Image: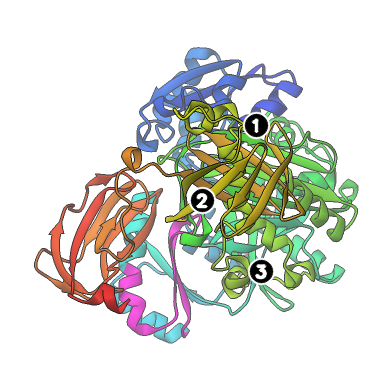
Amino acid sequence: MFEKILIANRGEIACRVIKTARKMGVKSVAVYSTADRRALHVRMADEAVCIGEPASSESYLRGDTIIKAALDCGAEAIHPGYGFLSENANFERACVASGLVFIGPSADSISAMGLKDCAKDIMSKAGVPVVPGYQGEQQDDNFLAEKAEEIGYPVLIKAVAGGGGKGMRLVEHASDFIGALATCRRESSAAFANDHLLIEKYLIQPRHIEVQVFGDRQGNVVHLFERDCSLQRRHQKVVEEAPAPNISDKFRIEICNAAVRAAQAIDYYGAGTVEFIVQGDTFYFMEMNTRLQVEHPVTEMITGQDLVEWQLRVACGEVLPLPQDDIAINGHAFESRLYAEDPSKGFMPQTGRVHHFSYPQQNQYMRVDTGIETGDSVSVHYDPMVAKLVTWGEDRTSAALNMAELLRRTYMGGLPSNQEFVASVFDHNVFIDAVIDTGFIARYEQDLIPETYARATENEIALAALFYLLGLDAQSSAVSPWNTHDNWRIGDSAMQRSLSLVNKGEVIHVLATCHGESLDVEGIGQVKLLSYHEGALKALIDGVEAYAVVLSHKKNITIFSNGRVVDLHLFAPELDGDIVDANGGRIVAPMPGSIVQVMVETGSFVSKGQPLLVMDSMKVETTLAANCDGGVKGVHIAPGDQVQEGTLLIEIEQEEGENDAA
């Protein structure tokens, strides 16, 4: 076995590899960008080496720098994790040329599967069914448009070097094809330095089922059964489970055997995943990921195997730890990806400091893989995934109930997240009945993300008022009665107090009369404190008991109550400046990023809903539209500009009378 390995990655996967290495007595070396100097994976590793600036192109994608770091510290092998250089054939070749072991497949296998068009040809020859489409060399826009017509709409445009939903668009009408093509080219070029695209027939309401395969250098290949990854937003997985529900034993055997044939066709060794698109009882090869997948924990939970340990053993030249006949399914497992993002704003990524992050102690039923701790930050430079919540149960129902419990007992404060959204998935009757496909989230979006999503209820406003006005947390003392200048204290005679809270961009004015440890909140009723300890707040609201966990940091609080997650901000105009009216004609950056395209100029007339500009954040393009009719008063950005969240981008002078009409 290796004595020391370097992990060419960051975040939760780097932490995950470090844990297994430590268990096996293998020393670990972390690499980090200057933005990650205090990251959890750096703190966990035995050694750590800085490899460059925050941008991935200046750090985690610098194969030469990473190899030098490995050689300098005496590492024998490099584990690439997933993403970054994990599927880069040239990096594998460079490792081998430098005398290092690449903990993954051969460069030839990576190359064979790295381009989706070539991969489909190989799979077709191996007898693995492939999706109808075009994956040729001709890339002229008009030619591709003709091919799309031949295939028949709807179609998927996909980057041949792509993954993670980048460089991919669903096109339902011919009139949208050329515009979508241009967007895919830009995203593909930016993310993969390759703007080559393919066209596939889009299957209606398909399932996304993938098979975990593993090979060794002696030519043995096994599968560790399948995972269902159908629940996706923006073509990225959110909830995964294993085994796939509602499939027959015959189907399971056929799809798993097809995956093994796919791996054998390219002499594969190491961990790999063969992804299939499934419609009814028919499956088609979609792509092969020549690395460990994000969702590998669900496979580990149902098989009892440590796939990272398998990777290290195979890379050392050992045979597979188990033959096919000794690998069996035990129970059911789910994984939920916890992202710093706002589902109510199209799952827009969020960045900043995580002021609090806690979860239950891990056991055989619950597991949390993460790369952050309280006080760490989610950076604009990297993926906004905070953690993977994983549960196991004897069957699907018990595993789902365990996930609901884990979600209820996981607390993240400081940034909006998709936690409430994921909890609503597990509470949805259709999901409970295992009637799932890739369109599930879009189809039930109004159920999963209602207009009231993350909007404070009267009870939550009452609890926030109680929390602030009674000064229940030392962190809120700067804005609590204890630090005001009116000498009011708990236990004094009744005194009227007011505060303003911001929730989802709206200002909520609260007027309350304080009576010791209770409040009379105007429009809500009497709120009486029952107990408060380390964030756990219990109160009576008009005689009805209410319970919540409240996390605070300076002027921000997050309330967790009945599966809901609500963020509130204590609004002080003298500190916060003006709150801009959402219909005020000011277009501001909803997140940090770069400007890709500006579609208007000063003096132009625009209509409400008209696209104004395209910006890129975390390699995902977002189009910002006019929020009113009017003339463009000012354009304050140009393509290539880097902007921060809240930056004023475009000003529109509204048509006279529009506010009155609204």
Quarter of the image for residue 474 reads: top right
Find disc 3 in the rendering and name its residue: 127
Q: Position of residue 209 (x, y in %)?
A: 68, 63
Q: Can residue 277 be seen at all in this image of the molecule?
A: yes
User: Which color scheme did the rendering employ for the protein?
Assistant: rainbow
Q: Could you tell me the amino acid type at mark 3?
A: Gly
* Disc 1, SS: loop
Q: Position of residue 202 (x, y in %)?
A: 53, 77
Labels 3 and 2: the sequence-earlier one: 3
Magenta residues span 152-181
Q: Nearer the viewer, residue 163 or 274?
A: 163
Labels 1 and 3: the sequence-earlier one: 3
Q: Position of residue 255 (x, y in %)?
A: 74, 65
* C-alpha separation, residue under disc 3 versus residue under disc 2: 71 Å
Q: Residue furthest front?
A: 493
Q: Position of residue 332 (x, y in %)?
A: 83, 54
* C-alpha separation, residue under disc 1 versus residue under disc 3: 79 Å
Q: Residue furthest left?
A: 603
Please say whether residue 238 is one of the residues in the magenta stretch. no
Vertical position of residue 165 compared to residue 490: above or below: below
Left-right relation of 319 to 284 = right
Residue 491, numbered label: 1
* Residue at image location 36% in from the left, 53% down from the top: 590
